[in-house]
Amino acid sequence: MISIRFFGDAPPAAAAAQMSKRVVYSDTAPNEAPRVPQMYPDCWPFAKESTKPVQERKIWEKSGKSSTESRPGESEDNNNLTNLEAAVWGNEVLFHPVYAFGTAGIRGAKELTATSIVYWDTRVCQNLFGTSIMFGVGTKHAATRARSQFVDLLGEDEHSYGLNQKGIARHCGMEIAVCDPLPYRDCVVGILFDGPGRKISFYRNGEYLCTPFTEIDVSETLYPMVSSTAQQSRFIVENQSCLYVAHSLTEAALLRVHSMSGSSYAHLPLPRTLVLRLGQMERRRHSLRRTPTKTRPVATIGVYTFRIPRCTMGVEDDQ
């Protein structure tokens, strides 16, 4: 892993040259919280993976979660408690309830699309500890497990975006420090997903933190995500709100035609202006979905833009 350390208003020349083709430093970075229209209350849980309900209930009871009600379909025949990596209880998730043997992640049930503006808080129910705890978003293809590896799970490839507890933002295997480390105690991380604006902003205990991801790829549905390497680490998602911004009829029709026709749009009986717009959409889709080389940046690939606030920043190797 490349170790980069920044001090002051701009990265050093060597690091800037290495990342100049894929990471853009801007003196006009958003230091103020983005303006958000009035949103409406929402409620969604974490997405449950296939687990045996009786095992999950026993894990919650062992961790101090009271649960005396039996659920439909539960059976006491199976008494073998296994190492579940993530036990879900509605809007709560408990990672590594028995033993931490790698990195685990979980997706929320909320769909994040190009027409949605969504905000949610993730409350950390214990002190921030461990190699990596990450907050962000990802597609259905984003990895949710890294067995026998204690790593930053979100942002490993083009399918997810994440911010870890050290204040480091990651996407496509590239990382850069965007803020101070998150507080060790009483930490609540807020995320504002702006689909129409194609950006993701983070909040810390109700205060605006940074907007590290802009020009994100919203051609595929994203979902809220959390990952952790810490044993018995518990998170609660709360304060959800959302707003849907409708496309114009022309934009909606173009998106529909593009999803159905793929790269064969040139032969459609459409006005030339619409064919050109379909071509722009197809080129953008290909440029955003190319997987970059992790060891050296590739000059021809523009995956995303990092906009860095004016602050002291640092990236350290994992100890």
Image: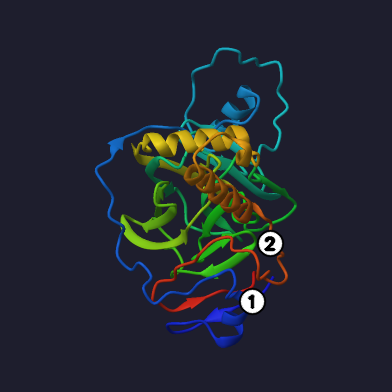
| Residue pointed to by mark 1 | 3
Single out the residue that lies furthest toward the top: 72
For label 1, the SS is loop
| Residue pointed to by mark 2 | 292
The residue that appears at 49% across and 21% down in the rendered structure is 68
Q: Position of residue 183 (x, y in %)?
A: 42, 63
The residue that appears at 38% across and 43% down in the rendered structure is 118
Instruction: Using the rendered image of the protein, determine whether residue 157 is visible from the camera's viewpoint.
Output: yes
Q: Observer-nearest residue: 296 or 310?
A: 296
Instruction: Give the amino acid at mark 2.
Output: Pro
Q: Observer-nearest residue: 62 or 217?
A: 217
Instruction: Give the amino acid at mark 1.
Output: Ser
The residue that appears at 63% across and 78% down in the rendered structure is 18
C-alpha separation, residue under disc 1 versus residue under disc 2? 18 Å
Quadrant of the drawing holding the N terminus: bottom right
Numbered badge on residue 264:
none
Single out the residue that lies furthest toward the right: 148
Count all numbered tags in the image, as a single digit: 2
Q: Are marks 1 and 2 in contact (CB under 8 Å)?
A: no
Q: Is residue 123 left or right of residue 279?
A: left
- First along the sequence among labels 1 and 2: 1
Quadrant of the drawing holding the C terminus: bottom right
The residue that appears at 37% across and 43% down in the rendered structure is 117
Relative vertical location of residue 159 with respect to residue 297 in this rendering, above or below: above
Q: Nearer the viewer, mark 1 or mark 2?
A: 2
